[in-house]
Image (cartoon, rainbow, N blue to C red):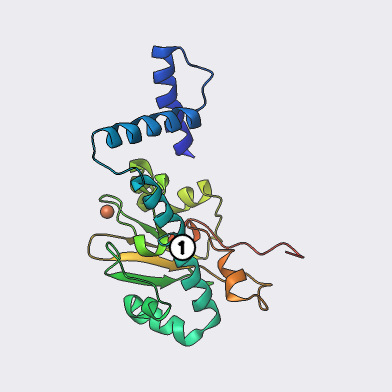
Amino acid sequence: MSTHDHDHDHQHADGEHHHHHERGPESYYAARTKALESLFREKGLIGTDTVDRVIHFFDHEMGPFNGARVVAKAWTDAAFKERLLEDANKAIKELGLREGIEGENLKVVENTPSTHNVVCCTLCSCWPWPLLGLPPYWFKDPVFRARVVREPRAVLKDFGVELETAKKVAIWDSSAQVRFFVIPERPEGTEHFSEEQLAALVSTEAMQGLGLVSQPQPGA
Ligand code: FE
């Protein structure tokens, strides 16, 4: 994906200045991040535990595991799914999930055998934070945002999603007013799965229509 190309470009440009070609992008960003964190602490802009608290928050409270719970519940409870499609903000409160900032006007759409939904934000990078946590790089990529509306099937292919030509693709443009969320199709062979097992199958990409939920491996 283009994420990698970008990382590589940055690293290469830096490497030419400092002749640190052997450093991978990971150690480069880790070092930059550490330097920024130290500087912010030194200047008194953040406390010593600020970064730990923020990371803990996105690891345990606001992440794609929330969205995956919503999907698993919708797959196993048809009445909940109807309420979710009708009024998503009201329905997610039933699961004890907070609406949170940047999630006030959620709209849930459902993938079916005839329609595949894809979410983007052509203007910037509006994202349903309370359900998915930190937005991934690809969602903010200007190339992705321009291409996905022009040639969604080609973009989907880049993400490893190949749809039958008969299947309709619907594009939803998230904005500050409304943020979209996709219920992917439930894979076959999961009839006896618990909600927790189902949730574990659901990726961030699938909840924005850039991925499918694959069938679990036999014995998994
Ligand atoms: Fe946006």
Foreground residue, 52 or 183?
52
Question: Where is residue 134 shown, x and y percent of the image?
Answer: 39, 53
State the quadrant of the C terminus.
bottom right
The residue under label 1 is 207
151 versus 166 height, above or below = above
Q: Quadrant of residue 128?
A: bottom left
Label 1 sits on a secondary structure element that is helix
In x, y percent, where is residue 170? 40, 64
Residue 9, quarter of picture: top left
| Residue closest to the far bottom | 79
Q: Residue drawn 35% across and 76% down?
A: 88
Question: In x, y percent, where is residue 62?
Answer: 40, 61
Tell me if I can see residue 135 in this picture.
Answer: no
Say which residue appears at 23% left-offset and 34% top-offset: 43
51 relative to 25, above or below: below
Amino acid carrying label 1: it is: Met
> How dense is the environment of label 1, judged by Cα within 10 Å: few (below 14), some, or many (20 and up)?
many
**Residue positioned 31% across, 64% down in the render:** 179
171 or 76, nearer to the observer: 76
* Relative horizontal placement of residue 53, taking residue 111 as reference (left or right): left
- Direction from residue 11 to residue 77 in the image, left or right: right
- The relative height of residue 11 versus residue 93 in the rendered view (above or below) is above
Q: How far across and how far down the image is residue 180, in percent?
A: 35, 65
- Count how many numbered circles sit on residues in the image: 1
Would residue 216 be seen by someone viewing this image from the given angle? yes
Q: Quadrant of ligand 1?
A: bottom left
